[in-house]
Image: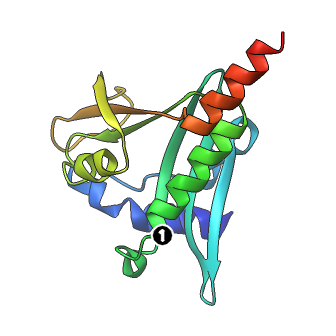
Amino acid sequence: MDALVALINVAFRPEQIAIQGDRINAAKLQPFFTTGKFLMLEDGEGLAGCVYAEVRGERGYIGLLSLRPKLKGLGLGRRLMTLAEKQLAEAGCTVADLRTISARSDLVPMYKHLGYEETGTTPMPPEIPLKIPCHFINMSKSLWTRSRRSRDWAARSKR
């Protein structure tokens, strides 16, 4: 758990332009293990990346995408996102949701490149200590692929 906390905090350091302190600690991380799953990548140096995926009915939530900073730009984030989306789709989710903070304007184009669309905004909870005003940007992506639609249609036709 310590390695996961350390990885997330180093990956989320750029948020500190807007939010005071570390992103997470062991106590805040613990509930994630009962509500969803972390998908992790390891290399010779240990934990290299992670992403959190949670099934919420027909929608899935993806969060805490984290990579060791020197590994950014190698396609590992895309790989983790693809794995999380696949896991959610296999669990029956038709949409993946995520959110990012408005102060990290560099992330919206990245998620759009992965097929996500902006769906609205949400205020930051009052318990998050902000340095500057910001909000969450909500984004979503359909997980319905052509082959999945075909399988679903075939299954309904057999009823």
Front position in the image: 2 or 41: 41
Front position in the image: 137 or 154: 154
Q: Position of residue 121 (x, y in %)?
A: 27, 24
Report the residue that reaches farthest toward the top.
159
**97 on left or right of 111:** right
Q: Which residue is mark 1?
A: 76
**122 on left or right of 154:** left
Residue drawn 29% across the image and 54% down it:
110
SS for tag 1?
helix
Q: Amino acid at mark 1?
A: Leu
Residue drawn 19% across the image and 45% down it:
103
Q: How many marks?
A: 1
Protein image colouring: rainbow
With respect to residue 139, does 2 lie above or below?
below
Q: In which quarter of the view is residue 132 placed? A: top left
With respect to residue 62, does 4 lie above or below?
below
Q: Position of residue 14 (x, y in %)?
A: 28, 60
Query: Is residue 26 among what the camera can see?
Result: yes
With respect to residue 69, does 51 lie above or below?
above
Report the residue that reaches farthest toward the bottom.
44
- The N terminus lies in which quarter of the figure? bottom right
Residue drawn 36% across the image and 43% down it:
115
Report the residue that reaches farthest toward the left.
132
Q: Residues within 10 Å of mark 1 (few under 14, many from 20)?
A: some
- The C terminus lies in which quarter of the figure? top right
Residue drawn 57% across the image and 45% down it:
85
**56 on left or right of 81:** right
